[in-house]
Amino acid sequence: MYIVILAGGSGTRFWPLSRGRNPKQLMSILGGKSMLQRTVERVLPLSPKRVLVVTNTLQAGETSRQLDQYRDAVHVDIIEEPVGRNTAPAIGLAARIIARHDPEGMMVVLPADHYITDEAEFHRTVKRGIASVLNGYLVTMGIIPTRPETGYGYIEVDADMRGEGPYPVQRFVEKPSLEKAMEFLDAGNFYWNSGMFMWRAGVILNRISEHMTGLASALDSLTFAGDIWELSDLNPQIKAMYHQLAAESIDYGIMEKADSVVVLPGSFGWSDVGSWSALPEVIEQDACGNVIINARDIVSLDSRGSIVYGGGKIVALIGVEDLVVVDSGDALMVCGKERAQEVKIIVQELEKRGLNEYL
Amino acid sequence: MYIVILAGGSGTRFWPLSRGRNPKQLMSILGGKSMLQRTVERVLPLSPKRVLVVTNTLQAGETSRQLDQYRDAVHVDIIEEPVGRNTAPAIGLAARIIARHDPEGMMVVLPADHYITDEAEFHRTVKRGIASVLNGYLVTMGIIPTRPETGYGYIEVDADMRGEGPYPVQRFVEKPSLEKAMEFLDAGNFYWNSGMFMWRAGVILNRISEHMTGLASALDSLTFAGDIWELSDLNPQIKAMYHQLAAESIDYGIMEKADSVVVLPGSFGWSDVGSWSALPEVIEQDACGNVIINARDIVSLDSRGSIVYGGGKIVALIGVEDLVVVDSGDALMVCGKERAQEVKIIVQELEKRGLNEYL
């Protein structure tokens, strides 16, 4: 088993804490280890042969530094994208590298910035998917929904399916309306599309050859110096080829088009922690539903449902509700909780004003 | 003319910016000069003989330091109270010191932490009060109300009064209900009780002898070393006498009881800046009614009516309304604007928890 970690995201949705050089996956938003480090630690019990981390040039140094501590436990390879091209090129590149050495090798593809509460259940789920992978299926992990979430895509399977799966995918569904999301939750045959996948390296490359011919020929053109896992020769080639590639997600490029796609249902306390307002999914709230992070102490008066990143300070709340408050040291954001997605508009505005030191 | 500045307040209502050693009057809440410095600069055009500043032992050093720059322009005396006893003892002490040298001397008593927009009109108002002072009246400045404020006491005069005043006081009215305050505003013969006074030193001492015999005998017992304005001999005596004194306001102790009290109406953009929520009275708001202080820059999205003290940071607001947000460096407060008075409850709670470095 090879673990492929997608770690190139810029994470503007956690501004002002996340920045170009300090994106969400490298941040210690929950205290302690970064999300990338947590992702690596989470897969070590699966005894992978190697961990391949696909990141970008800007973040490669810090990514490598954060992973140094795991190099005794597992081989870690850092693959640098010169520019983001969504998930299909990143996954294809990792598949090409693995297949060069081990075409039958199984890849487990995981985003670096997701959170999983129940790691043992996650391990059991991965193991439940192995038989399908060996049989040549493309396996996508589907999270058993716990609420009518409108921020995720869904995967539908036949309503008559029984057992633990994997089940054949009937269709992928875009982010639904609340009404639709409530129907999906009631129906019971819909899963959240998590962006976590399992397959053989050779199998996904074959599908790329079928459905993404441009990417396939670019990957074919890569030449390897020898039979060793030394990727430094590869980086100039990656740099040269990447700018020509079209940006495409693996979902749209392959999963929604290919046959033999199955969904592996899982329920392990998963969250993609997509914005500040998602933190209550992964951090314990106090009795008033407040989540207080990185505060010296908290004094709260009639205040409910807020998320505060306190910059190490004493935090005092008086009569406030459903806010996101973040003190990053050089920036102070106060945001209505239901508008946390709009942080990216602030980032755009700062860019327009040339305040690059805050990006 | 002698100016007496009451500068001993602790100003917990501007926590977390104000602290025991950095109370409101010594703070530069508006940027630039402190409120005490602004108060001194405001009276210099009145060419006072001396400025007497009554403060407390904890704040005396910083008070003196802030006033050093004015010692070429005017004689500044610092009087240290060992403990706060409200306004009557502070005013009585200053009157005793002035009367020792100049019993006919006129005192103008001003709190150190009030804000005045129109200084020229303030000077004209003071000059309009001089004749009444010379005639032996106790003059209290009454602000012509501009809104039905429920946070101030009011002073009523006869409804038939014409001209600019001063007018004889009919009665002092406690902080009213909103309904009452609207009646007062409509009636036109009510003024805000500003806590600013004018009188002869000998006259107020006589009234203290009539109405506050305990304070009067304590003041009488003070002995002066010579005929010079050297107060250092006085501080041990003040220290010894102060703990015996009862805390009493000059309003309750004298003004509400004495005869010959007149109100001098004024309209010079006055505010006592009694809490964070009062800042829009004295600082210009942006187009959305936000007051942003001490921010590196501000990016605001659908946000209205908030007051932000930004700790020198970039401030980003998204969909928030009527908040007070204060970053003091070691504390971060977020408060509903209409609840800004409750900051003192936070201060009490911090005290209870022994977090004295934040007090």
Image (cartoon, coloured by chain):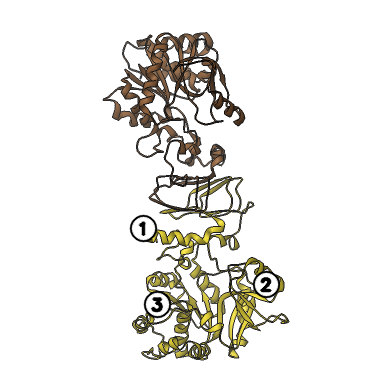
Chain colours: A yellow, B brown
Instruction: Give B307 or B84, whichever is nearer the viewer.
Output: B307
Which residue is rendered at x = 40% and y = 65% of the image?
Answer: A20
Q: Separation of disc 3 and disc 1 at Cα?
A: 30 Å
Q: Give the amino acid at mark 3.
A: Glu
Secondary element under disc 3, as helix, strand or loop, is: strand
- Residue A303 vs A80, above or below: the answer is above
Q: Which residue is mark 2?
A: A184
Taking the image as drawn, is residue B61 in sight? no
Q: Which residue is mark 1?
A: A353
Location of residue A347 (image quadrant) = bottom left
- Write the residue at 57% across / 58% down: A338
| Label 1 vs 2, first from the N-terminus | 2
Q: Chain of mark 2?
A: A
Give the residue number, with chain letter if any, for mark 3: A80
Q: Earlier in the sequence, mark 3 or mark 2?
A: 3
Image quadrant holding the C terminus of chain A, namely bottom left
Provide the chain ID for the residue under circle 1: A
Q: Secondary structure at mark 1?
A: loop
